[in-house]
Amino acid sequence: MKAQVKAQVKAQGTANAQRQFDPVAGHPTPQVAFADVTLDLGGKTIIENLSLGVQPAEFLCIVGASGCGKTTALRLAAGLYQPTRGKVTFDGQPMREPRREIAIVFQDYGKALLPWRTAAGNVSLALEAGGMPAAERPARIEELLRTVGLPGHAGKYPAEMSGGMQQRLQIARCLAQEPKTLLMDEPFGALDAMTRQGLQDEVLSLVAASGVTVIFVTHDLDEAIYLGDRVIGLLPHPGRIGIELPVNLPRPRDQLSTREHPEFLRLRRQLFDFIKATEQ
Amino acid sequence: MKTTGILWRLASFAVAAGFVALWQLIANFKLVSPVFLPGPDRAWASLVRGFSSGDLLAKLAGTVEHMAYGWLAASIAGIALGAVIGSSPRMRTYVAPSLEFLRPLPVSAIIPVAIAMLGLTQAMALFVIAFGAIWPIMLATIHGFAAVEPRLYEVARSLQMSKLAVIFKIALPSASPDILAGMRLSLTVALILAVVCEILAGLDGLGHWVLLSARAFRSADLFAGVILLGVTGYVTSVAMSLAEHRLLAWQASQR
Amino acid sequence: MSDNTAKNTAKHTAKALVLPVALLVAFEVWARATHLQSDSLAAPSDVVRALAEAFADFSILIATRDTLFSAFTGLAIGSIIGLALGIAFGLSNTLNRLMEVTVEAIRPIPSIALLPIALIALGFGYRMEIVIVAFACVWPILILSRAAVRSIEPRLMEVSRALRLPAAQRVWKIIIPAALPRIFVAFRLSAGIALIVAVTVEIAINPIGLGAGIMLAQQALRADLMLAYLVWIGVIGYALNIVLVVAQRRLFGRAALSGDSA
């Protein structure tokens, strides 16, 4: 597994470098855009006047104190919520309902997988929804499970897998949608530190290989800087943008050298101060 | 580990055999009048006689048939109705309270009404059995559908699954443990109601057989019938357990 | 806030009543419009009148007394036997394993199948009904109380051993109180079963109580009285359930209800 990822990373070294996102000379039309979005839920304003554009192939991380509406913002992008005012668009078209080009990885993998289907069956669900003929599915399932590092686990039920494996499985199902945009809601929040770092690197290489756009919500500042092309910090009550930081760290990134990079430490300091200020 | 399990099982069978021997002794010494209590030897002889002449087999088949048809009809209707009611929050608020009110109603009380409508017929028996057996299944299905993890519905939405696909791929499998538990409960209800209907309407079956035997004070035949009813209850419940075990294999690892 | 929730519950109750009230009104109108003459159906107003008459001449009250007497006596006997066996099997694994085959052989016999045996041994009347009800109630109590005893916190059993409590006191002071919430759940379920079995026996054969009353009304082609009995039996079943659920909540708090699925 490890060797395979390394090989992939090497092969995509150049692609990775190109992926380096430049917000100034960015793509003219964003893939996912929030235009002055406000959301009221149960008489409370959760998100207020949020404007945001995510360019194709960008890796955007959203951080913020708990209750700042970062998960809600992600659900708006997924089409699971409709804004009270303003507009959410995907490729220029307004989002009225969820679409198959947008996949969402939920934090609570235990609830988002079908416990009565095996790993292969869970991946198959997305293929079935996409109308892939039954005969073509097994090969695709095997390929996807290999991509996320679960070869040989096709016949296992989610309950027989560790948390990290279940989250890999959920990612595989999302990849089966062949999404243009991948929304990730604190996907590694419930995992231990070692598993988490391994999955971070795997997500980076997967994203580099497929060129998918990612919006990644996390409360872990290091994770946000390590993964993202850009980090947005939200202010709570109601949720709105408080800080926006481009991350100019070289790719491919490395758990040791990237985290020791002076730029990483500077961004970390800046974000840390921001979050601390919002909590007071 | 395994051998001790088998040894326990054997010891347990020995204890059961001891009880049968005790029963035989009580009968032999006529501690209880043989009119009421035949020895296990006489009950066994009656069983063998009944099966070799085919009488008892026909009665057994009759009871199993009543039970199975009623139960199957109840299962299909119960799951369908439960799915419709359970998957719509609006239906739940309007219909579920009425169903909850009807739940503790002793279902056998519907028998006179069924007799008034359908007479002492096979149709009456099937209606009563199905009516009695539908409640546990329908209520379990409603509960199962209402308790589907909301996150799974979101997954279905983001995959843009059709309404039908959501029911068959998400809701039904998710509710299947509840539904199967309801079907298991209904099996017992169906057997009891089958016996009662046979007694009341004189339909061909073990219920009628045991009643006739009792009226004629043929206690050996009576016990043979009761034993067969016990076996029917046991076999159907074991079959149901096996089915549950197979269908819910995915749950085994969760517990 | 509390005003709001009160309003909400009122709204829910109102919504719950929409369906049954609508059905009753529609049926009443239909029955009046078609001058319904039937052996099996009667207008709701006629059913209410028949129920009132049955109350006025005490016939339904006497029947209720008979049914409840048989059901509760059977329930008491069945509970005591079931509880004693359940506690014994729960405490002694040896006993439990030795009795396994015997229990599994007798338990699946449908209670109603004992009816003819009870009939020839005891004749018509309370006694045969009580025996059948008791038989039906033994099993749920046995199985649930056995599970309840087994799930008692082992620390508690160690305490009782350390205190050197004699066996009888151990059962009375530690085991029963510790297992009581779950035993009560078993009792509640069995009470429902007792009522069902009692009515069923009466409908099938025994000429006493509510079951016999409803059968008699049917044979007399009194659809209104028959449905009045049906409604009344339903009310009793519902009331019994409510009383026991409330008692359970009062005695053991809401937490005890979570043991229901067991």
Image (cartoon, rainbow, N blue to C red):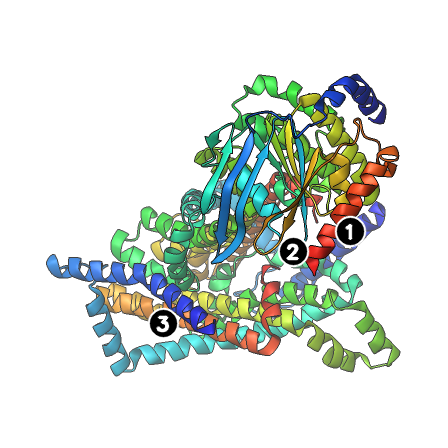
Residue under pointer 1:
B10
Q: Secondary structure at mark 3?
A: helix
Residue A138 at what x, y percent from top left? Answer: 64, 21
Tell us which disc is closer to us: 1 or 2.
Answer: 2
Residue under pointer 2:
C104
Tag 1 near tag 2, CB within 8 Å: no
Q: Secondary structure at mark 2?
A: helix
- Tell me which amino acid carries mark 1: Leu
Residue at 32% over, 66% down: C230
Q: Residues within 10 Å of mark 3 (few under 14, many from 20)?
A: many
Residue C49 position by quadrant: bottom left
- Tell me which amino acid carries mark 3: Leu
Residue at 16% over, 60% down: C29
Residue under pointer 3:
C210
**Badge number at residue A86:** none
In the image: residue C218, left or right of residue C31: right
Residue at 60% over, 72% down: C184
Q: Residues within 10 Å of mark 1 (few under 14, many from 20)?
A: some
Observer-nearest residue: A206 or C247?
A: A206
In the image: residue C108, left or right of residue A264: left
Tag 3 near tag 1, CB within 8 Å: no
Tell us which disc is closer to us: 3 or 1.
Answer: 3
- Of labels 3 and 2, earlier in sequence is 2
Q: CA distance from mark 3 to mark 2?
A: 33 Å
Observer-nearest residue: C117 or C38?
A: C38
Residue at 40% over, 69% down: C7
